[in-house]
Amino acid sequence: MKAMYGVGLVAVLVLAVLAAPGWAQEKGKPVTVTGRVIDNVCLFPAGLKGESHRECASGCDKAGVRMALLDEKANVLYTLMADAPFKDPNAPLREYFERVVTMKGNLYMAPGGQRILAVQEVKAAQAANPCGAKNPCGAKK
């Protein structure tokens, strides 16, 4: 009887070792994404966003709400996290609440299709040239 338990235990351990790579999280994919830094708590239930909502977003930040990135063109929402343990995930975002930014970081795909971005760099997004490349502003036709 003890021998059967021993064989069973060895079989379970072998299966666990073989299945472990399936449990491991894949390495994040380096990406650059442009979108609006949003406050989920106010955006989704109340529709609050934009410059008029910046002060409220700061209050939510102080209450511990984690900000997100909304790519409005692609209609994709990214959950944001720090790029290392024990770091404040909102720290690099505070000056950009409710503004459009370009972020660099590592993208992780979570169960259910959730996109999680480990933020490494944040900067204000470059505005598109309203004059266009073919007719630079001020050029005579």
Image (cartoon, rainbow, N blue to C red):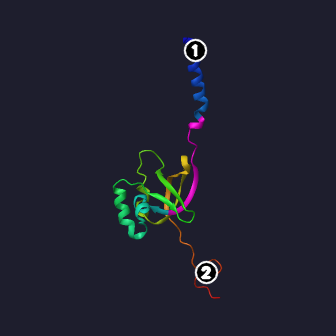
State yes or no: discs 2 and 1 in contact (Cβ < 8 Å).
no
Q: Secondary structure at mark 2?
A: loop
Residue at which label 2 appears: 136
Q: Nearer the viewer, residue 11 or 138?
A: 11
- Image quadrant occupied by the N terminus: top right
Res 21 label: none
Q: Amino acid at mark 2?
A: Pro
Q: Can you tell which quarter of the image residue 51 is in?
A: bottom left
Residue neighbourhood size for the residue with mark 2, other residues' Cα within 10 Å, grouped as few (<14), some (14–19), many (≥20): few
* Placement of 70 over or under 82, stated as above or below: below
The secondary structure type at the circle numbered 1 is helix
Q: Amino acid at mark 1?
A: Met
Q: Residue at x 34, y 56 (%)?
A: 62
Q: Residue at x 53, y 71 (%)?
A: 127
Q: What are the residue bounds of the magenta stretch?
A: 21-35
Task: Examine the structure image and report whether residue 63 is included in the region drawn in magenta.
Answer: no
Image location (x, y in percent) of residue 78: 51, 56
Q: Residue at x 57, y 24 (%)?
A: 12
Residue 134 is situated, as x and y percent measured from the top left of the image, at 65, 79
Q: Is residue 32 magenta?
A: yes
Task: List x then y, in percent, for residue 82.
Answer: 46, 50
Answer yes or no: is residue 110 visible.
no
Q: Residues within 10 Å of mark 1 (few under 14, many from 20)?
A: few
- How far apart marks 2 and 1 lie (CA) works out to 81 Å
Q: Quadrant of the C terminus?
A: bottom right
